[in-house]
Image: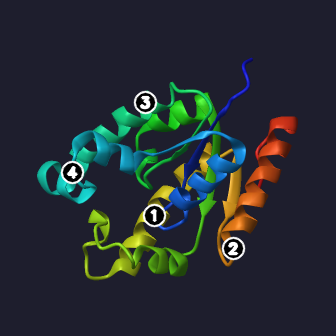
């Protein structure tokens, strides 16, 4: 079997997927893609505009189609949108074509990391904490089910998280088993 060269970062919004993915890609000499940024690039508009015009279903269809194209590439790191794993097709394609890393974080860190960006369509509601808790409760089983590696980003500096990922990737490739 061909060694899986792609690395996919999944997890809730605000878990650090984009920041960590970019740094990790440089360290490992891989090409970095962020699914949200790619959708914005291809459409020429922000994600919030797509949500306004097409709703979440329209956005999820665009997201699914983009991810199914990106997983055909080799030697990439892909930061996925927090809700991308809702799609069974996306989950299956991630599992079959790369190493899936679940970047887990608590609600406090999510609130802090998402407070700088007011363009998150799913956080337009008044009670952001409640919405983040609901999304996490619904999505965590999906993240956990497809993850080869589980990393908590709580109370850790980015360089520590990167080192932990690199160590667990090495162990995973040697042992071919999930790493918590």
What residue do we see at 51% from left, 77% from top?
A: 107
Instruction: Name the colouring of the figure.
Output: rainbow
Q: Earlier in the sequence, mark 1 or mark 3?
A: 1
| Extreme-top residue of the structure | 1
- State the residue position of label 4: 45
Q: Earlier in the sequence, mark 1 or mark 4?
A: 1
Q: Position of residue 139 (x, y in %)?
A: 48, 57
Q: Residues within 10 Å of mark 3 (few under 14, many from 20)?
A: some
- State the residue position of label 1: 13
Assign a secondary structure to mark 1.
Answer: loop
Q: Looking at the image, is 161 positioned above or below residue 73?
A: below
Assign a secondary structure to mark 3.
Answer: helix
What is the C-alpha distance between the residues marked 1 and 4?
Answer: 20 Å
* Residues tagged 2 and 1 counted as in contact (Cβ below 8 A): no
What numbered label is drawn on residue 68? 3
Q: Position of residue 53 (x, y in %)?
A: 12, 51
Q: Looking at the image, is 96 positioned above or below residue 156?
A: above
Closer to the camera in the image, 67 or 163: 163
Closer to the camera in the image, 100 or 45: 45
What is the C-alpha distance between the residues marked 1 and 3?
Answer: 20 Å
**Which circle, 2 or 1, is nearer the viewer?**
2
- Quarter of the image for the C terminus: give it: bottom right
Residue 60 seen in the current view: no
What is the C-alpha distance between the residues marked 4 and 2?
Answer: 32 Å
């Amino acid at each position: 079997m061909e060694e899986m060269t792609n690395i996919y970062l999944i997890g809730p919004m605000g878990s650090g997927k984009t920041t960590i993915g970019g740094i990790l890609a440089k360290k490992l000499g891989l090409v970095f893609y962020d699914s949200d940024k790619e959708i914005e690039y291809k459409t020429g508009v922000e994600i919030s505009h797509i949500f306004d015009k097409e709703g979440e279903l329209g956005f999820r269809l665009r997201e699914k189609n983009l991810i199914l194209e990106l997983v055909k590439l080799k030697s990439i790191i892909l930061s996925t949108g927090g809700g991308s794993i809702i799609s069974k097709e996306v989950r299956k394609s991630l599992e079959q074509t790369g190493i899936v890393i679940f970047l887990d974080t608590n609600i406090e860190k999510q609130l802090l990391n998402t407070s700088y960006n007011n363009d998150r369509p799913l956080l337009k509601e008044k009670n952001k904490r409640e919405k983040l808790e609901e999304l996490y409760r619904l999505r965590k089983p999906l993240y956990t089910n497809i993850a080869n590696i589980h990393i908590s980003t709580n109370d850790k500096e980015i360089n520590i998280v990167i080192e932990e990922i690199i160590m667990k990737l090495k162990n995973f490739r040697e042992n071919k088993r999930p790493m918590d």
